Image (cartoon, helix red, strand yellow):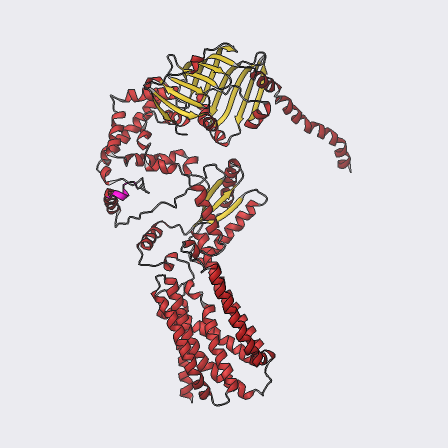
Amino acid sequence: MFRITTMIRVLPVLVVLAGVPQLCAAAAMDLAPVKQWIIRQNDFHAVTADFTQTRSMSALRSPLENNGRLWFKSPDSFRWELGSPAKLIALRMKDTIYLIQPAKKRAERSVMSAMNQNVSGFGLGMMNIPFAHDFATFQKQYETLAISMDGTCCHLAVLPRDPQAHKMLTSLKLDFNTTNGNLLSFEIRTRDGSSLRNEFTNVKINTKINSSVFDFDFTGYEVVDAKQ
Amino acid sequence: MQNNNSRWILLGVVAVTCIAMGLSRVNFNIDILELLPAKLQEVQGLSIFLKNFSQPNELVITLESDDAESAELAADSLAEHLQGRADLVKQAVARPPWEKNPADLAELLAFALLNQSPEKIGELTTRISPAQAPETLTASLATLSESISPQKLAMASHDPYDFGASLANSDLLAQSQQSEFASADGTFRVLYVTAAKPLENYKATIIWSKAIKQEAAKWCGQRNVKLGFTGQPAFVADISGSMEWDMMSSGAITLVVIALIFWLCYRRAQPLMILQVLLIFIFTVSLGIAGLLLDHLTVIGVGCAAIMIGLSVDYGYFVYQQSRQQHGTVRALQRHCLQNIMWTAGTTAAAFFALNFSSLPGLSQLGNLVGIGVIVGAVVMLGIFAPITARFHRLEQARPASTLERGFATPRFQRYGAWITLMLVAVLLGSLVFKGFPSATFSPTALRPRANDAYIALDRLSSRLSDDQDMLSLVIAGHDESAVLTRDAIIRRVTPFRKLGRASSILPSVSTSTALVESSRIMIFGRVVNALAIESLCC
């Protein structure tokens, strides 16, 4: 009898306490900054930025660093250069993306949609602009692992829901400025303990970009279709 | 009189012994090779293949789910569940062993590397030579620094001296693209389950397969997965079990139908029971004789009980009908029936014995067994059933004919019967004219049992995992490895076979075998420098 009455008294307390962790989780996973950031990204029509790419691999004691630069112009023009002078160029022309190795005078041609479906798309070490067309698409494509705020900087960790990506990746980490929407860094972590981090500087939004940036003269190049 | 009885007893003992010996040779195990023409080279090749590579104790379980992740988890869970039944399962494997322990693959890859052509081994030697090694390392560093290909990054970080490049286009890596454990989309998984003890016969196989299926069903519960069972044990259990049942059920059904017709016609229980016992006796004696005389006797041949019983009962009906009309001696009855029965039995047996010209051993056995059965049936019906039925009719008081008998005897039935028969013939011939002759199916699938789960699961597995239906398998056998390798090399020089992949990429080829010793040194050196390379990259 004592136990039953005690239980009845304690029950409301237990119910409330049981709800607390969920409330805390909901508070911790407040994705409002992401929603704002995605909306803001839709206003980006042109972006240029410098970046430093750091590759850390389990087999290497010291990480490898490379500098690069990227250009984006909506809706579908994109250029990404690694190294100076460029050792690798990723160039998007409409639905085709070229991976160009100037030193070898060689280029691989891929269909962008196929590349997005393929995990190797993440190997570019860059993110799509915009990251997702809307918040619903973001939630459909990514599972949010963690989100935290540090002043105006939002740290977001996600994992693509795509099973192929799931097999290889442990997380994608993004840092962005909630004030102006600028992406600060983008990091890929793989299951073998390696990571690839891009830190962006000198980011310019909606700046004028010469269209010749998105052209490339393939004269003298061997252009082959990439194996998907 | 006493001598006469002793002779009959001795004859009975000899007959029973012979029958028992013959019956002991009947084999219910399904050996597919015993059902195929043994003279065909394809069958001989298949025989060599199965003799060396068959997995009589390995059940293949297929598992399908809506998404790759749940399929993978479910396959691992089922493997773990089955592994828990140590009394049933020796091992249950749901993924390649090297996925859990990648180091297990190292020796196989090293051996495959040794089996490459001398040119490739030469390239490797150059790549890791003291003069070239720094350049190779620099190239690997460049790949690590610049490449965006996950595969290249993974390879370069773990194999900076690029040992794997020599295997890039090898058959081994080409085959590794096709997983034996999962479909490309991951929603279809395969488990390989080995029995705890060798399955000695089809009975043990049926019991084991059933136990595994029950365990799998218990594990499955409310899970949203679809399971299938195939592999050699599944086929043996399904086919042997169903054949055993077919044989028993078809014979039993035939006996029931015979009893029904006899009862409708004559309404006599005693001769009916004697006829049934004699039919079983005919089948048993025929089986015993066939077991003694024939080299092989499989369940396919034995499965003809219904035909044998159906033919033998005709003679019994004839003898019974004649005994009702004839009131003379037993000898007179036998003489009266002898000519008719021997003619029909002789022609029927000859037709069935002619099946020996068939290339399929199963058909030959069926022909022999039915032929023997028809002769035994004729002898038994004349020698045993005729005296019994004659005595029965002598003792029985005259009874009025049954309604059916009276119906058959009326002139109206004979007149209408003729017309009905003519009309039936006209309708059937007309259907042939309008619909044409039935089409012949020459596909091997026509020989498959109906609704066989093992076949269904195998078809699903073939369509989801790999499609090798257009591939021609070439089986090379030899007394030892070098004989096989020599024949392999000779065959590869023949133009049509140049494009053949080698099933056993890990076997050293004749051309590289001479370079093995040298390349072994390279490998040892390679391992050392590889370790050093990783260190140097770390610096």
Q: Which residue of the protein is positioned furthest toward the left in this rendering?
A: B514
Query: Vertically, is A220 above or below B103?
Result: above
Query: Vertically, is A202 above or below B70?
Result: above
Measuring from the top left, give residue B270's x and y in whole percent.
55, 80
Q: Is residue B317 magenta?
A: no
- B160 and B421: which is toward the camera: B421
- B120 and A37: which is toward the camera: A37
Q: Is residue B197 left or right of residue B162?
A: right
Q: Is residue B340 left or right of residue A29?
A: left
Q: Is residue B136 left or right of residue B61?
A: left
Query: Vertically, is B160 above or below B422?
Result: above
Q: Which residue is pictured at 36% across the width and 62% down the height?
A: B361
Measuring from the top left, give residue B314's x and y in whole percent.
48, 76
The residues colored magenta run B494-499
Q: Quarter holding the N terminus of chain B?
A: bottom left
Q: Which residue is pictured at 39% across the width and 71% down the height?
A: B371
